[in-house]
Image (spheres, rainbow, N blue to C red):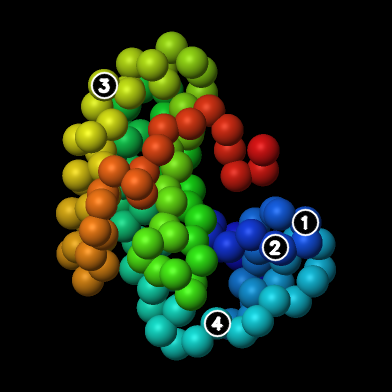
Amino acid sequence: MSLVKGKLCNFCQKPSLRANFFVVAQCGVAMKKLSKVQLKQQAAVLEAVTALEQQALEALPGTVQCWFSMEYEAFPGSLLVRLQFSSQPYLDQAQTQLLLWQKKLSALLLKKGVVLKDMRRHLVFTLSGPDD
């Protein structure tokens, strides 16, 4: 099983694991099967977020990781990407560049065929990780 950044269990609120196209939460609760369209959406977002993470690791000091959450039924409006930093000084320094990184995310998703209506709603900088 591999960690899928993007779906939280309704019961334990922890990231879920994907096994044979079923989404299984870390608490062991089986969630509904993803459709082909949802799998394509998930793959497109994962590729864009991974590319953004690589750029951030090179350009922004203190970057730890990039992760996302979304509700498949309300996609792409529900997409929220979080760029995690190691400490408050790094986060404060990066906040001045937030709009630039929101534009980068929007461009990466557009290349994958995902159009964001308001790019400012879909990327935030944070200190908390997916397990917090």
**Could you tell whether 115 is left or right of 43 in the image?**
left
Q: Residue at x 23, y 65 (%)?
A: 115
On the image, numbered disc 4 is attached to which residue?
34
Label 3, label 1: how far apart the Cα atoms are: 35 Å
Label 1, label 4: how far apart the Cα atoms are: 19 Å
- Circle 1: residue type: Cys
On the image, numbered disc 3 is attached to which residue?
96
- Circle 2: residue type: Cys
Whole-percent x, y for residue 5 in the image: 53, 57
* Residue 24, numbered label: none
Number of numbered discs visible in the structure rendering: 4
- Circle 4: residue type: Leu
On the image, numbered disc 1 is attached to which residue?
12
Label 4, label 2: how far apart the Cα atoms are: 14 Å
> Which element type, helix, strand or loop, lies under badge 2?
loop
Q: Quadrant of the C terminus?
A: top right
Whole-percent x, y for residue 42 in the image: 43, 70
Label 2, label 3: how far apart the Cα atoms are: 33 Å
* Residue 9, numbered label: 2
Whole-percent x, y for residue 2 in the image: 61, 65
**Could you tell whether 8 is left or right of 47 in the image?**
right
